[in-house]
Each structure stands twice: as structure tokens, then as C-alpha cells.
Image (tube, rainbow, N blue to C red):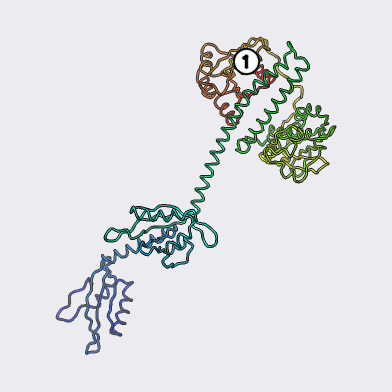
Amino acid sequence: MFGTEPPRDNNGGDSAAVCRALHPDDAPGCRRSLHEAARSLTPWIREFRTLRDGKVRWLESRALPEPHPDGGVLWHGFTADVTARKETELALRTGEQRWSMAAEAAGIGIAQFDRRTDCLSLDAIACANHGLPAPQKALPMSDWLAQLHPADRIAARLGVEQAMDRRGLLESRFRLLLADGSARTLEIFAHCTLDDGGMVTGMLGTCRDVTQQAAHEQLRRDKETAERASRAKSEFLSRVSHELRTPLNGILGFAQLMTLDRVHPLAPDQARRLDSVMHAGHHLLDLINDVLDLARIEQGDVALQRAPVDLMAAVRACIALIQPLADNAGVRVLAPAPTPQWSLGDARAVEQVLINLLSNAIKYNRPAGLVQVTLQRENGWVHLAVSDEGAGLTPVQQAHLFEPFNRLGAEQRRVEGTGLGLVIARALAHAMGGQLGLSSSPGRGSTFTLSLQAAPAPSGAVEPDQTQREAAPPPSSHTRSVLYIEDEPLNQLLMKELFRSRPHWTLHVAGDGTAGLAHLARTRPDLVLADMNLPDMNGLELIRRVRHTAATADLHCVALSADAMQSQIDAALAAGYNAYWTKPIHVPKVLAGIEALLQ
């Protein structure tokens, strides 16, 4: 063991060689403890290492001292090689240290339940997880259950009892209420312990604080639930919009045809009644459009571009559109001085906000009142204000102004509206990086201000000539062929009536996608109008087949649908349609659009 020669002639061994065999880190301690045991004549028990040829061995020595007549000490003892045992102990100790580090890092505590005493034993980490000081004496099961959320106590007790009855596992999560009023979620994983006879004596397991993980999982579930609800709402709105727009297309379409009929003009009384039908139909259409706009904004399904917009040009265009409403109400609309003012925004969204503000200023004005539009540039912002001389708004009314469908009592005065316009206007303003402000007081009218970041005029910006902008292409006198793929008989009839005003156009009608593709296989029309919801295939499948056929790959195709959801429009355009027109149709615009395409 020490690498020395055996003693000869009872002269003892080479003590110096024995000392040289000791490991350098253990030699000083061995010497000190040996001298102390000799001085006090007490037993010497020591574990130490030897180092020979680079190999480490563990030895254990046990010896008893005896005084020698010559004044020295005689030792009686033995030394054993305990390397295997020591390596096992060190491995176990290392494993325990690693487990302790891992358990501490993961927050895993050890808990043991004794069935006989009905008590729990918790280690330091388990105590910390339970909000208890460590060390903790045996914790009665009743006290542990009292810490749990009332809704979890019965499940916890039953879970432990059922696991022991079945000699199975307990794997569950329980909510824990701490003394400071906070709550934690503990994850328990335990198995049964057995005695020598195979009887269940209790359970041994781990507990881990998973409060944050449970919160993240709940957030994920809430997010998925919200997304499902959002998708369901989108699908519902899409379906409702489609189902409402389809009959409206017939109502408004035929009413427009009757209004435009110069061959068989209506009597004045009939014309007024028809105007009432169209007015009611357009009011319902406005409500449908506002609901869809609000849904798109809430879902973030609004694609706005932030580019330089000439607000002065937008004001002129919107005042021209709104002027008939002002004339009917006897309200004057004053525009600002014709000076271009450029801001960052989306041109279409700016006009939608401005139309809403102007129409409100007219509808809620006093008789023979005034609507004043002003433009002002200040500190990098452009402020577009619309002021009226109406009754104004109280602070209470202003607090509820931007609530959907809340019309602040205007419905009792028979003023038309949906209660969504300002909600949509403010959302569009925010989406453009701006804001919509309000200044109002009772009896002094209201001023709504759209504020957008100022922008320099784009290079080469030229104000288009108004006459050129509104000029329509001259009607074509050449015979043109149009294929209309539509399954709704009322819509087919409306399109046929519309085409009667253009005798140089020939309309072919197909009742489904299969019939439409068969017609295209026989002859090539100049234009295809297709509904998106056909009985045998949807419009996306139809356009894919058209584009994948060499003879019709470049054919001009327009989707004509009652589905006005932006996602459907984007999908149709991406699939290959050249344009997307929504129902109900505006007869003059559809005629002009077809005329332009057939040019």
C-alpha cells in the first residue's frame, strides 16, 4: 500500500518511505493528527490519500497508542485500502450536489407524505415554494389543504387518496394562497412509497412553483380564444354582409335603372316614392359598410399607406361630394383659401374621415347654419378643422362620443346616422399616426380637428385639371361581348336590364362556374364578370382555372361580389382578378367601368 520494503529483523519499516507515499495535500494533516493522538493517547482514525506512480489510492488507518518504556509511543493498528468505497461516496456526493444545484435552479422541492401521521415533510425549496420558513416541522395535511384555493382543496385531497389506493402517481396543479394575499400555482408530481410488505406508507414527490408558466399558458389560451372569436366574428360579418348586400343589390340596382330610364319616365309621385326607397336602401348600405369598417379596424385589417397627401385637394373633393346634402339642409359650407397643404397619411382614409366630419357638421347644424373648414400648419403638424353652428355637446356627451352605436340621443330627433362614423374616423386618424380632437360647448357648436404630421410636397406634384379628372371615356360603338357568371336570378336579371341601355354590348350569362368555363372553352369574350360565391366552386378556383388555360390566361376578369371583406378582396386580386367590384352596384359607375374596360 505504501510502496516500501517489509521490515526485517524486527527493526521496523522505513517510516520516511511511508511519509513520502502520502499525498502532498493530505500529509500535513496526517502528521498533525497523529502527533495530537500520541500526545493525548487517544485512538487515531484517519482517511487519507497516497500517490504512487501518478495513481491516487484512498487508505483508512485505525490505531491505538501505548506508552513505551523508553518514553516513546507504540502503536497497534491496521490500514485498509478503501479506494472503491471512497470513489462511490464521492460519486454519490457529486451526484447529490448536482441534483441540489439543478433542483435549486429549477425551484424543485421535495415533499414526503406519511400516511400514518397524516403529515407532510418539506425540504428547504419546498418550504420556499409554499411560502413557509425552513426548516419546517411536520406539516399536517389539514394545514396544507387550508393553504390551497378553496376550489382546489377537495380535488387535492381526493387526488392523494386515489393515488395511494391505486398505488399510482399524482400529477396535478393546485393554487396556493399565501399569507400576504398573493397566489401561486404549484405543480405536484409524486409516487407511492411501500413498506417491506408492499403496503402503501405514503407518497414521495416534487413540488415546483409554475405560477409564471401557468400565467403564460393562460395568456396563450386567452389569445387563442380571442383569435377564434375574432375569426368567428369576421366570418359572421362576412356572411351577414353578403346576405344583406345580395337583396340590396336588386333593390338599389332596379331603383337606379328606373330612375335613369328616359324611355319610360316615372310620374312625379312615383319618382318621389322611388327616391324614398333608394334613400332607405343607401342608409342600410351605409350601416353595413360602417360595421365592416369598424370590424376591419378592430382586427388590424386596414392597410393604410403613409404618403404625402394634399389636404386642400381632399377638402375640395369632399366638399363637392357633400354639397348636395348641404343644399338640402340649407347649410353653407365654406372652404379654406386654396393653398396646398401636404401631410403624411392615406388619401382614401383622409377623405373618409373628412366626409364623416362634414356630413355630421351639416346634419347636426342649425337651420341656415354655416360649416367652416380651416387648414393650419403648426410645429410640424397640419390641422384640418371642421366647425359647425349646431347645439354643441355637453361634457357628459363628449365622454360618450366615441362609443360604437351611441348617438347621444340624436336618434330621438330623427337625425340619420349609425353611431359608428366618429369611431371609425378616430381609428383611421390613429392608424395614420395622427389624432382626432374635439372642442365643443353647449349652444356654441362643435369643432372636430384632424391633425396629421406635415410633409413636403412631392417633387413634380401638379394639380390635375378638374375637367380632365371627371371626363369619362367616350362610349364605344364597337360590339363587345361580356360573360357574366352568376347563380342569383335577381342579379342576372339586373345585369340584363343594365345591358339593355348598351345595345352594342352582348351579355352572356352562366349560372355556375362549370357553365362559365364551358362557355370560355367555346368562345372568348372581351370581359368576364364573376360572382365569388358560386354553387359548384368559389371565385378563387374559377380564376385559377381561367389563368391556367393558355387561351384565357390574359383575359380581363372582374370579381363582382357582395362579400366586401378586405381579406376576400385581397385574396381575389392575388389569385388573378384584375379588379373587384362590390354589390350593391352603382349603376352609372358600373356602366362607366365596363365601358372603360371594353375600350
**Which residue lies at the image location 73% right of the left edge and 31% below the top edge?**
461
Question: Dividing the picture into quarters, in which one does residue 53 lie?
Answer: bottom left
Question: Dividing the picture into quarters, in which one does residue 330 lie?
Answer: top right
Question: Dividing the picture into quarters, in which one does residue 585 lie?
Answer: top right
**Which residue lies at the image location 29% right of the left edge and 75% below the top edge?**
46
Q: Residue furthest right?
A: 368
Q: Is residue 45 left or right of residue 169?
A: left
Type of residue at label 1? Leu
Q: Is residue 477 above or below residue 89?
A: above
Q: Is residue 458 visible?
A: no
Q: Position of residue 263 (x, y in %)?
A: 73, 10
Q: Is residue 87 visible?
A: yes
Q: Is residue 185 above or below residue 597?
A: below
Q: Quadrant of the C terminus?
A: top right
Question: Which of 100/175 is in front?
Answer: 175
Question: Which of 265/19 is in front?
Answer: 265
